[in-house]
Amino acid sequence: MRNLSKSKIIAFRQCQKRLWLELHKPELRDDSASEVVFRIGYQVGDIARTIYDPDGSGVTIDIEELGHGEALAHSAVLLAQGHSPVFEAGMRIAGALAYADVMLPDLSDGTLRWRMVEVKSSTGMAAYHQDDIAVQAYIAVCSGVRLSSVSLAHIDNSFVYQGDGDYRGLLHEVDLTDEALSRGDEVKQWIDAAQVVAALAEEPEVPTGPHCTTPFTCGFCGYCNRDKARPEYPLASLPNLHRRKREQFESGGYEDIRNVPDDLLNAMQKRVKQCCIIGKAFFDAEGAAADLSAFGFPAYFLDFETVNFAVPIWKGTRPYQQIPFQFSLHCLDQAGTLSHTAFLNLTGSDPSAALAQSLVDQGGNEGPVFAYNASFETTRIRELAGRFPELATALICIIERVVDLLPIARKRYYHPSQLGSWSIKAVLPALCPELSYTQLDGVHDGDMAVEAFKEAVNPKTTPQRKQEIEHQLFEYCKLDTFAMVRLWQIFSGSSI
């Protein structure tokens, strides 16, 4: 019998095949999509220790340093003594083990009991969190640990950091004691069934399906789909395809959108299907030009790059708040002169005030401000106006000039290579093949920009590397707004 960790039991809950692969072929797992989530979880865990152990008297079990055997033995001693909080306390029963994020001694009834708190970096509670807590509580109780309460602590996204290192209020606790302690029989069945799967000599046959991405994307998706025929234009390429409709298509044997009957599609979906059949783009040039005809000059083209921290580090900001650290701004005048300005702050201090002032200074007083999926930019500007009242009037004036290019692109243009997406990175290669994000050095998309920013502001980053990142970020964001300039030129029919 294996000692299955809590994470392995939760893996079994998602998919039997996933559990077997986790145990027998872990090298096939692709963890790249989970790395950022893991880092955030570690960061939130560190802050949780300061919240639950403000005087620093607690003990953290370092599994990496001690190894499972010693970590479990040391945990047992600490949980028997009850002198202080214990973090990452290990508990084991026959066939299963778990490490609790937070264990707080409770002597309120004159005996030693423990408050168990599981810390999550999400801003709410999901169904699988309840399964997670139930497994942990069952293992604790069966290992002889008396629990007074069982809670889940998740991030409260209404928390505003005051810049003083005090994160009290960052976490919101949900009491799950009754539910967690009442599911012991259910958890035992999971463990027993997981042990059966773990003991299989061959991997179980489990077809791919919605469970592959619910409640999160499985790292073995690539392996499980390795031999699956991939249609040239999969159903995912249909815009606004709801889950039930997709399931209807799949049950009808439709895998390629070109085979889906027209009477099952809406007008936009029919257009996409037809483009794929003929292999050519749809472009309503006359309509696009009419959409843009009302907007004069100078024409501005704006794009932000933002960072969001689960644990806010700058005063006046909230968890996961999108904080702009960079903008690119192209300006095209009636004579056809194109100029470019930009803002980028890599000092590590809050860039918000300086960025807001620079945007006001560089954004002009008249003329449209084009953005792509403009609600993102307008929301960021409105947040800046709320934080800096002295700039609010000027910032709101910029918002009133914003024009969104995305609805025009969605209504007037589609190329089969977009595969159902109207993101600028999907539209640009079709309209302007000479421009490519893949040719950029280092930073090719928004996620890479965020990671590059975090690396740049890390005190351990060398000045040379920081300079490299600055150039990469500058060129990436500049291409975003130049791409909008090119889209505007093509859509407007301009010779400028």
Image (cartoon, rainbow, N blue to C red):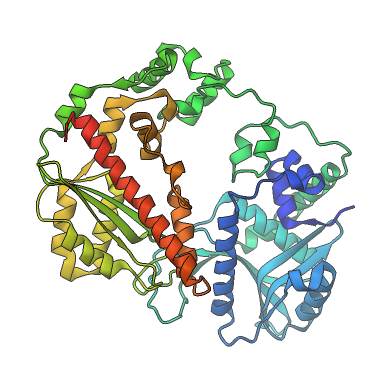
Q: Which of 54 and 404 is in front in this view?
A: 404
Q: Nearer the viewer, residue 182 or 466?
A: 466
Can residue 373 be seen in this snapshot?
Answer: no
In the drawing, does residue 207 fall left or right of residue 397?
right
Question: Where residue 391 sits in the image (x, y, percent)?
Answer: 17, 67
Q: At 42% across and 56% down in the image, what residue appears?
A: 472
Q: At 30% across and 67% down in the image, what residue appears?
A: 352
In the picture, the quarter occupied by the C terminus is: top left
In the drawing, does residue 225 fall left or right of residue 446?
right
Tally of marks? 0
- Name above or below for residue 223 compared with residue 107: above
Question: Where residue 441 sits in the image (x, y, percent)?
Answer: 46, 50
Q: At 39% across and 21% down in the image, what residue appears?
A: 272
Can residue 84 be seen in this snapshot?
Answer: yes
- Name above or below for residue 326 compared with residue 228: below
Q: Quadrant of residue 218?
A: top right
Question: Where residue 393 sits in the image (x, y, percent)?
Answer: 13, 62
Q: Which of 180 and 61 is in front in this view?
A: 61
In the drawing, does residue 213 fall left or right of residue 450?
right
Question: Where residue 493 sits in the image (x, y, percent)?
Answer: 18, 28
In the drawing, does residue 41 fall left or right of residue 157?
right
